[in-house]
Amino acid sequence: MQLSIFRFNPERDDKPYVQDYEIELRATEVMLLDVLLRIKAQDNTLTFRKSCREGVCGSDAMNINGRNGLACITPLRWLKEPVMLRPLPSFPVIRDLVVDMTRFFSQYHSIKPYLINAEPLPEKERLQSPEERDKLNGLYECIMCGCCTSQCPSSWWNPDKFVGPAGLLQADRFIADSRDRATQERLDDLNDVYRLFRCRTIMNCTEVCPKGLAPSRAIESIRLAMLKNSL
Ligand code: SF4
Ligand code: SF4
Ligand code: FES
């Protein structure tokens, strides 16, 4: 298999370059991460993140043949050669395929990603009915990999002001939670030309999410909640 991989080590390189690799596939190598691990065994200067190998930790998000995805759940048979691997677009590069996610996580923290409820604690736990719990499906599964935000044009142009699809999906997760008591505060915070309304419904986010989630639907649901609240 032929791969072309973006390389950049700011301590050594004046500018980025692309390095070609050729690997004879083994029968046990099924996913893109399997091949990356073998390249790493031969060339330990290649740098990328990974952890769970199961599409759960979100750390091996990268741009694969022009489309963001997770290397560990991208089957090799899906890929046209030479496979071009780049770091997540629009995120600052630290080294090779590793990007700086500071701004991404600061947008996430800005939506207060935790339950807000000052009512006295029940003896055991705050209960939900099965119907209330069902409202979190399609939202709680987000692994914060960054694939959606990195491929969102509105995030490229206003990364400091637009929360971005991942953060907005998480905002909807707490707005939809029957145990949360800060719905109005959350909606007021997002009711801004940049924070939420910079989304232009381009749908790249939903198109690339490797977990099959739909941030654009979550954004629409926040807009509808705002409308309902204003009537
Ligand atoms: S919505 Fe999907 S693409 Fe975006 S951060 Fe969550 S899991 Fe990743
Ligand atoms: S739908 Fe909105 S959040 Fe999603 S990619 Fe388009 S502009 Fe970005
Ligand atoms: S290694 Fe954890 S999502 Fe791929």
Image (tube, grey):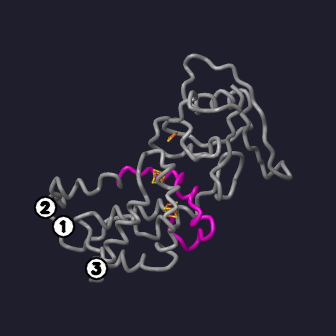
Dominant secondary structure of the residues highlighted in magenta in the image = loop
Q: CA distance from mark 2 to mark 3?
A: 32 Å
Where residue 172 appears, as percent x and y from the top left, is: 36, 64
- In reply to whether residue 46 is colored magenta, the answer given is no
Q: Name the residue beneath numbered marker 1.
A: 121
Q: Nearer the viewer, mark 2 or mark 3?
A: 3
Examine the rendered structure and indicate whether residue 141 appears above or below residue 118: above
Tell which circle, 2 or 3, labels the residue nearer the N-terminal end.
2
- Could you say whether the residue bearing mark 2 is in a helix, strand or loop? loop
Examine the rendered structure and indicate whether residue 3 appears above or below residue 109: above
Residue density around tag 2, few if under 14, some if 14–19, many if 20 or more, within 10 Å: few
Please provide the residue range marked out in magenta: 140-164
Quadrant where the N terminus lies?
top right
Residue density around tag 1, few if under 14, some if 14–19, many if 20 or more, within 10 Å: few
Residue for point 30% across, 83% down: 230
The amino acid beneath tag 1 is Leu
Closest to the observer, 191 or 92: 191
Q: Name the residue beneath numbered marker 2.
A: 123
Where residue 156 appears, as percent x and y from the top left, is: 62, 64
Where residue 52 appears, as percent x and y from the top left, is: 48, 38
Residue density around tag 3, few if under 14, some if 14–19, many if 20 or more, within 10 Å: few
Residue for point 30% across, 52% down: 137
Q: CA distance from mark 1 to mark 3?
A: 27 Å
Q: Residue furthest bottom?
A: 231
Res. 229 mark: 3
Where residue 222 appears, as percent x and y from the top left, is: 36, 69
Q: Residue furthest top?
A: 27
Tell which circle, 1 or 3, labels the residue nearer the N-terminal end.
1
The amino acid beneath tag 3 is Asn
Q: Residues at badges 2 and 1 in contact (C-beta under 8 Å)?
A: yes
The amino acid beneath tag 2 is Glu
